[in-house]
Amino acid sequence: MSDSSYRLSPEFPFPAPLEDSLAVVNHVVTHPDEFRIDPHRVAVAGDSSGGNMAASIALRLKDRIAMQILVSPALQFFNFQTTSFVENMPYFHDSINSPAELVLVTNYLGIPPLDYQHLLANNHTSRSLKRSHWADRVDQRIWMRRDLVRNKHLLEQLHSDFSSNNDFLSDKLEELITDPYVGPLMADDKMLRSTPEAYIVSCGYDFFRDDGVMFAQRLMSVGNMVTHKHYPTGFHHAWLFPHGPLRVTVGVDIIKDLVKFLSDRL
């Protein structure tokens, strides 16, 4: 397999979906009259990978965006052995929490689909990268709220094994997975400071629960305005079920709380 399989196209320094979204938002905020909007009241929002893109756009256009709304966001591709991945593997295993769902991550990153197995085992980062300053930015012993982890011992246990690594793959992916615009949790404090007000939704039974929690903690640590709403019984995409035959109470609550927040704040 050639090295080019792991490189983003020179014409598109970021994943193509992110480039498209950034172009759209930039056009809207630079042409407010065309859309008859108040340029000071523009929010970016997204769910899952959309939350990733919304956070990335907020980093890029921080002076033009009023708010970022991140629902169950996937915000880093450095550590796939987070407490939320380990705890939630048994739940919805044949649907959204299936390990095979990481194929969607490889599609987004533009890398070979079979590499999802390396990602899941954290085999895509070398020993040195696991011990680097990049790892500090997603270190759950620092940034994960213990009260939101059901199995507390996991916070220490998951950081004790550095045996799984693929130096070749790590070398090819390092630039990509440490890019803050690809994984916003990889941003340093200076970059995170003064980003738009954030509304972050995390769900207890979601693979990506910890990404949203850690991002909220990091944003608050640099003095940003953050509203973090956590739903212990929630799951990935729970907010898509506020009515109809699959109506779930937590989905109703997520929508209700978000609408109230937008009414009050924007």
Image (cartoon, grey):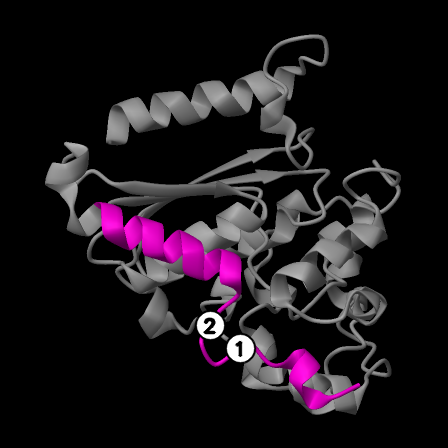
Q: Quadrant of residue 93?
A: top right
Instruction: Write the residue at 81% across / 48% down.
Output: 87
Instruction: Write the residue at 50% across / 71% down.
Output: 186
Q: Is residue 97 above or below residue 188?
A: above
Q: Position of residue 16 (x, y in %)?
A: 51, 62
Magenta stretch, residue numbers: 1-28
Q: Is residue 127 above or below residue 262?
A: below
Quadrant where the N terminus sits is bottom right
Quadrant where the C terminus sits is top left
Q: Position of residue 261 (x, y in %)?
A: 35, 27
Amino acid, disc 1: Ser
Q: Quadrant of residue 38?
A: top left
In the image, is 238 to the left or to the right of 198?
A: right
Label 2: which residue?
A: 12
Instruction: Write the residue at 72% across / 14% down.
Output: 246
Q: Position of residue 187 (x, y in %)?
A: 44, 71
Q: Is residue 79 above or below residue 229?
A: below
- Residue 203's label in the rendered image is none
The residue carrying pointer 1 sits among few (fewer than 14), some (14 to 19) or many (20 or more) residues within 10 Å by Cα, namely few
Q: Is residue 19 above or below residue 25?
A: below
Amino acid, disc 2: Phe
- Residue 9's label in the rendered image is 1
Q: Is residue 224 magenta?
A: no
Secondary structure, mark 1, is loop
